[in-house]
Image: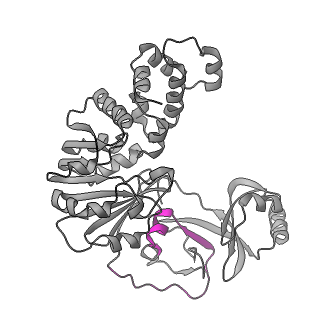
Amino acid sequence: MQSNNIIDVLESEEAISFISENISADLPSITFKYAGKTSFNFIICLQLMAIYVKAQKKIPLFWDKLLAIDQRSYEQCTSQAVAEYKCTFMGGETLLDITGGIGVDSIFLSSAFQSVKAVEKNMELHQLAAYNVTKLGIPNLIRLCGDGADYLDQKYDWIYIDPDRRPGNTRAVALPLLVPNVLDLLTDLKRCATWVYIKLSPLFDLVEIWRQFKNVNAVHLIAERGEIKEVGVILDMASSSHQKIVILKDVYSDFSQEINLEIPVVFKFSEEISGPYLLVPIALVSKAGAAHFFLKDTVTSKHETFDLYFSKSSTVYGFRSFEIIRQTGLNSKELKLVCHDLGITQLNIVLKGIADTPGLWHKKLGTKDGGTCFLFLLKGNKNHAILAQSIFRDNKSF
């Protein structure tokens, strides 16, 4: 979609009425009914509607205000809840976003700063983002088209960087492969910024952060509905030493925890596997390697191979809890008989150390996906299976 075509549709009163009246309709049906019968670009309108349907959850502001967006920028943009969370720890007089994109972050961060500049290289994307800023009427947010690094010519309270992780349509995680290469900008950032926020892939290795940067103030691990969305690194450009502070936050739930990795936690796991409950760390805890911080007051034994824990406590903050029903070997015939005897026809299969798919094991066991039972198939130093019942907890808390 070209930016001018998208904007033309959004400037058409007929198109706006059509979108509002048909957003819940079946798109193939209305395509057949209205194709060739509108004065606006019908194909572009349908493409926008398909994005708006999904945007109602991820970035509801874009649906509420019918803002300009295309499929690629939708896929790559920050969710609204994550952007709003960043306003809780970023703020000041001036912010420069050198990787403006469609502008979700800068739109919300503009409420925390007196002045925000957002720079985007791609002209088409810039035009969409600039249109949105005008439509929203945000006077302290300036959109610029160009190379963000060229604006590192004055002092800012914060500089925001979301490097492109898909240069040349290939996915990258390592810092030198991202665009821009943040490591090459460090000298300029030190001169121009008090604080820097770098948005990195959820797959980025936390250990690598402290190896690559010498002035880390904090690392934010940000999740939404249990899925890690980004690793955010805050650099204190006036400092020359680390703070190994990691903040775990799920923006959907009330889960929030700050951990200082520099403070050792003296903790030993029980040598014997005991307890009727299986504890599985949520993604944030697992990513931070912080299970022991949460288990220090709980008598727990760890699985010898995997990040799984056995306990007499049914609930521990930062963990999903399961009541163990049965432990067996990895023999599919034995497992099928157990499921049959217990009347289990639905279960969720979790594979660790096994290259198979859940579908293959469902076929072996004669089960289907779903329900509240979980079958953990574990192949490590010891091969075994754990059949367990999920202990339901409100997914707004952990």
Name which residue lies at 36% across and 69% down: 209
Of all residues shown, which one is farthest toward the front? 168
Name which residue lies at 48% across and 15% down: 40
Q: What range of the chain is rendered magenta? A: 263-291
Front one among 310 and 129: 129
Side of 109 where 371 appears, left or right: right
Front one among 77 and 85: 77
Which of the 4 image quadrants contains residue 301? Answer: bottom right
Name which residue lies at 60% across and 79% down: 303
Question: Does residue 269 show up magenta in the picture?
Answer: yes
Residue 113 in picture, x, y percent from top left: 20, 45
Is residue 271 among what the camera can see? yes
Which of the 4 image quadrants contains residue 366? Answer: bottom right
Question: Does residue 34 show up magenta in the picture?
Answer: no
Side of 323 where 131 appears, left or right: left
Side of 332 where 34 appears, left or right: left
Residue 12 in picture, x, y percent from top left: 42, 16
Residue 223 in picture, x, y percent from top left: 44, 56
Up-down relation of residue 64 to residue 83 (above or below): above
Residue 117 in picture, x, y percent from top left: 23, 42
Of all residues shown, which one is farthest toward the bottom? 271
Is residue 260 among what the camera can see? no
Front one among 58 and 226: 58
